[in-house]
Image (spheres, helix red, strand yellow):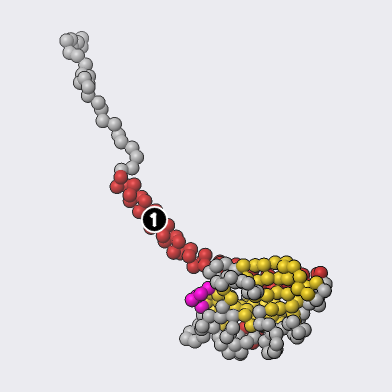
Amino acid sequence: MAPVRMTGVEKSSPKKGFMRPRKQSGFTLIESMVAISIFMIATAIGFMSLGPAWRDARVTAAYNSALMTMRQARELAIENRKTYLLTFNPVGTPTGVNQIRIQRLDGGAVGPTVSNITMPSDMAFVALPGIPNTNATSPDNMGSGANAVEFDIGVNNGAANQIYFFPDGSARDINNNINNGVVYIARANDLYSSRAITLFGAAGRIRGWRLYPPSGVGVGQWSQQ
């Protein structure tokens, strides 16, 4: 049988003016706000977790700067066969600023400034309350933790903030006495950010230290770095 052919029937077509709905793309306002909130929370968590590491890095940088500056002064004296004066917070240092200055001596007189290092603004030469405060517990048994900058220990008429490095590598004071001492570096109100640098004047030996919390109850302990 032949197929029946339908006639007089039009193909269906969209009505005039009728638009098929399109699938919308992108974020809605609520979705955008949720995404921003998640991003802000993740950022805050990141800052909180990285904050201690960032602060510790600044402490380490300040400590290394002071340590290297002291060693630089000694090396300059040996290499150039001249005496170099290193001063912590020399006269004229602005309040709240901590500096180390190296000057060369020419003909026995203090000459030009070779280096002038400024510590980070949140770091200072300071002996914080709570550090070990006896000679037996201080770094290399230098002083008793009472003063932030204490060189020329046990010598009268010297300057506690000055070190003269001689061509033989030794460290002395203005009166040619052997100069032993210590300088403490820390962030205010952060006891275990404390670092220390000791000096044995006879050999010009310079050593670095870090304060660690006690394993139990008690006072922190210094450990050589």
What is the quadrant of the N terminus in the image? top left
Residue drawn 53% across the image and 73% down it: 187
Residue drawn 49% across the image and 68% down it: 52
Q: Is residue 178 magenta?
A: no
Q: Position of residue 48 (x, y in %)?
A: 44, 64
Q: Is residue 46 left or right of residue 212?
A: left
Q: Quadrant of residue 116?
A: bottom right
Frontmost residue, 42 versus 8: 42
Q: Is residue 37 left or right of residue 144?
A: left
Residue drawn 60% across the image and 68% down it: 119
Instruction: Establish if 7 lies above or below 141.
Output: above
Frontmost residue, 204 versus 98: 98
Mark 1 sits on what residue? 40
Region of the chain picked out in magenta, as a range = 187-191
What is the quadrant of the C terminus in the image? bottom right
Residue drawn 59% across the image and 87% down it: 144
Frontmost residue, 111 versus 117: 111
Q: Is the magenta stretch mostly helix, strand or loop?
A: strand
Instruction: Establish if 90 lies above or below 28.
Output: below
Q: Which amino acid does label 1 sit on?
A: Met
Residue 97 appears in the picture as rendered? yes
